[in-house]
Image (cartoon, coloured by chain):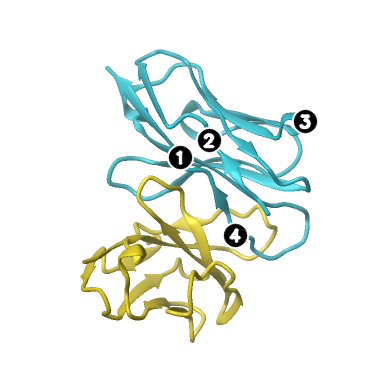
């Protein structure tokens, strides 16, 4: 069975500080990894995803994440946060591979990020 | 174009009532998912449709939960004899067919409160 762990429940940063949110997954096979963001009052939106290839993935709004297979990790980073990054961040995994067919996502419990102006 | 829409956005039910939650996926999206998000938790998978076929319902917590997508577009999640533990946000997501890494697009959710 798959599971995803996010160890930071609430992170508070000042603007311009660097961000790193931890994410660990449990699935031992080929895996797809995602970071979703939920801004206050809005629905879940995809920040970035790892499917295959370069383990350093760049997403929208200056976010990036690195897939480290040996550590089962997919941490999210941003060098300088803004007040508008205040949101809930969810890491998720699904079974990977080239076969077609959708796969349900397994989510972590989320990390609430508060950026202080 | 329009994203995934869900209705109602909020639903309050008395324990024992039946409820029906609707999801309108993005036009042309073959795959449709339902997730349940309890307070303070991440979304948890309930069920998955490919067109009108329900291919996976392993996440449905009990036989009180039933989902359908009869024409391969709009989907309804029905909960019979609601219980307090059913209180949660119910999310719908849709995606194109294709490789498993395809992005799922989420709707705003329906917040169900069972009194």
Residue depth check, mark 4 versus mark 3: number of the one nearer the observer: 3
Q: Between marks 2 and 3, how big is the CA–CA gap?
A: 17 Å
- Front residue of A8/A117: it is A8
Q: Secondary structure at mark 2?
A: loop
Q: Are marks 4 and 2 on the same chain?
A: yes
Please state if B78 lies on the left or on the right of A74 as rendered.
Answer: left
Chain under callout 2: A
Q: Which chain is yellow?
A: B
Residue beneath label 2, please? Answer: A6
Q: Residues within 10 Å of mark 2 (few under 14, many from 20)?
A: many
Q: Which chain is cyan?
A: A
Chain under callout 1: A
- Front residue of A29/B40: it is B40
Residue B1: tell me if it is visible.
no
Disc on res. A104: 4
Residue beneath label 1, please? Answer: A110
Residue beneath label 3, please? Answer: A70
């Amino acid at each position: 069975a798959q599971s995803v762990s996010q160890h930071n429940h609430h992170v508070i940063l000042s603007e311009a500080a660097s961000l790193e949110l931890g994410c660990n997954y449990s699935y031992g096979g080929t895996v797809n990894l995602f970071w979703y963001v939920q801004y206050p009052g809005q629905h879940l939106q995809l920040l970035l995803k790892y499917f295959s290839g370069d383990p350093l993935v760049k997403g929208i709004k200056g976010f990036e994440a690195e897939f480290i297979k040996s550590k089962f990790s997919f941490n999210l980073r941003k060098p300088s946060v803004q007040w508008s990054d205040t949101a809930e961040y969810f890491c998720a995994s699904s079974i990977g591979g080239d076969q077609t067919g959708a796969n349900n996502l397994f989510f972590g419990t989320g990390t609430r990020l508060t950026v202080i102006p | 174009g329009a994203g995934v829409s869900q209705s109602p956005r909020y639903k309050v039910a008395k324990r024992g009532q039946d409820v029906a939650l609707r999801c309108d996926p993005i036009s042309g999206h073959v795959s449709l998912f339902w997730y349940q998000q309890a307070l303070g938790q991440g979304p948890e998978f309930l069920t998955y449709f490919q067109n009108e076929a329900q291919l996976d319902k392993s996440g449905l917590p009990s036989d009180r939960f039933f989902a359908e997508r009869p024409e391969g577009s709009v989907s309804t999640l029905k909960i019979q004899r609601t219980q307090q533990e059913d209180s949660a946000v119910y999310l719908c997501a849709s995606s194109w067919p294709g490789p498993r890494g395809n992005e799922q697009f989420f709707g705003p959710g329906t917040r169900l409160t069972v009194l």
